Structures are given as C-alpha cells and as structure tokens.
Image: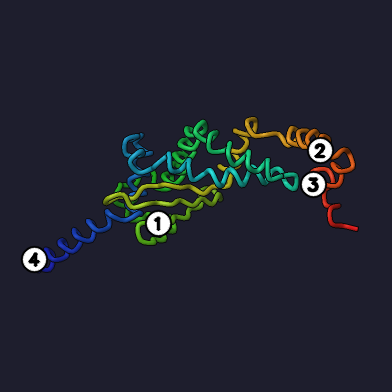
Amino acid sequence: MLLVGILVLVIAFFWWQNYKTTPAYSLALLVDAVQTNDRATFDQLVDTDSVVKNFVPQVTEKAIGQYASGITGALREQIEALVPTLLPSVKQKVRDEVTKQIKALAARAEGKPFILIALGMPYEVEIKEEGDTAHVAVNLNNRPVELTMQRNGDLWKITAVKDDALVQQIVQSIAKDLPSIQNELEKQVRDQLKKGGLQDLLNNNPLLNGNKKGKK
C-alpha cells in the first residue's frame, strides 16, 4: 500500500512539472501577478512591445474603415505610414487594458489558492496549441478577447491581443493625428484643377463622383 502511495506521488510530481510548462500554467501565473501587483512577473509574461506592434494592422484597418468609400490610395498610404508612429503613445493604455482583462479573468479565481487557479484555467479559457504558439479565447464580461502566446523557455508569453473594443478605443485616441479626409479632398481638388480643369475633376475624382464612374 505504501508503495502504491509513493508511486502516485511520483506520477503526480512529474505530471505537475510537465503542467508547469503549459500555457494554462503561465496564464495562472499572470493572474496571480495581477492580483499581487507583481510587475516583474507581468513583464515576464506579457510582451507589451509585441502586443502594441501586433495592433498596427488591426488599428490601421479600423481607421481606414472609418473613411468608408472615401478612402483613396494616397490617404491609405498616409494612414498605414502614420499608425505605427502613433501607437507607441498608447503603449501604456494597451498595458492598462491588458491588465484590466487579466483582472477580469482573475476575479473568477478570487480567494482561491494558486494550485486551484492553475488547475482550473483550462476550464475558464479555450486554449489551442500549435507548436510553440498558443491561441487563447476568453469571454470577459460578454466581450470576446483572443490572446496569442509564444513559448518562452518553460513559460509562455502573451505577444498579441485581438480585442475589437480596444482597437476602437485606440483609433479614437489617435484620431486627431490621422489625416483628415476633408484635407485630402481639398488637396485632390487643387491638384486636379491644375491638371485638367473642373470637368476633368468631376469625371476622375472618386471622392466627388461617388459611384457614378462607369455608369451610363
């Protein structure tokens, strides 16, 4: 009987050591870090620079989408060039929002010992591993959020966040620095008038003729 007990303990020990290398365990560590305000562990488990960098295409497309049919090639190029330079200014906002998301996840585990948080994590979030990458889907107060994690030694680090609500917040915060569609329209009007006059402007400028081009 004693031998069986020792064998169970040995198996449990090795299973736990292996479990500590999973994304679920790293998420549990992150939850604990947020609960205890452990910034060093937070920075070890969240690559804020990579998270901000991965927001670039999300924010760019959202910003371009707000121009609707008025977007032109020149304006798109302006926005694509500007967004990467503006995002560092909202780096702290991204960090604060990711912390808030982890706190929302941590609220479900409030008062529980760490081992139960770690063991329960796979039941709180949906984790799909693909080699050294893991995709985590979690619903935070009816707000779907997707996290991308990369293996980092024996731990996993969050490198990207997909959150439409946060993307919208970022677009709003940098909107004042984005090119104005009115300014772009005025510029195109001036350039077109110089080249071909009023009639050429009406025939060739998509911002002015809408969907008329190509119709008879």
In the image shown, does 203 or 184 lie closer to the viewer? 203
**What is the distance, in whole Å, between disc 4 and disc 3 at their CAs?**
83 Å
What amino acid is at disc 4? Leu
Question: Looking at the image, which residue is at 34% across and 47% down?
Answer: 112
Q: Residues within 10 Å of mark 3 (few under 14, many from 20)?
A: some
Question: Looking at the image, which residue is at 71% across and 34% down?
Answer: 180
**Residue 140 pos. (x, y %):** 51, 48
Residue identified by numbered label 3: 206
- The earlier-in-sequence mark between 2 and 3 is 2
What amino acid is at disc 2? Lys
Q: Secondary structure at mark 3?
A: helix
- The earlier-in-sequence mark between 4 and 1 is 4
Can you say which quadrant of the picture contains the N terminus?
bottom left
- The earlier-in-sequence mark between 4 and 3 is 4
Q: Secondary structure at mark 1?
A: strand
Q: In front: mark 3 or mark 1? A: 3
Residue identified by numbered label 2: 195
Q: Secondary structure at mark 2?
A: helix
- The earlier-in-sequence mark between 1 and 2 is 1
**What is the distance, in whole Å, between disc 1 and disc 2 at their CAs?**
54 Å
**What is the distance, in whole Å, between disc 4 and disc 1 at their CAs?**
40 Å
Q: Quadrant of residue 48?
A: top left
Can you say which quadrant of the picture contains the C terminus?
bottom right
Q: In front: mark 4 or mark 3? A: 3
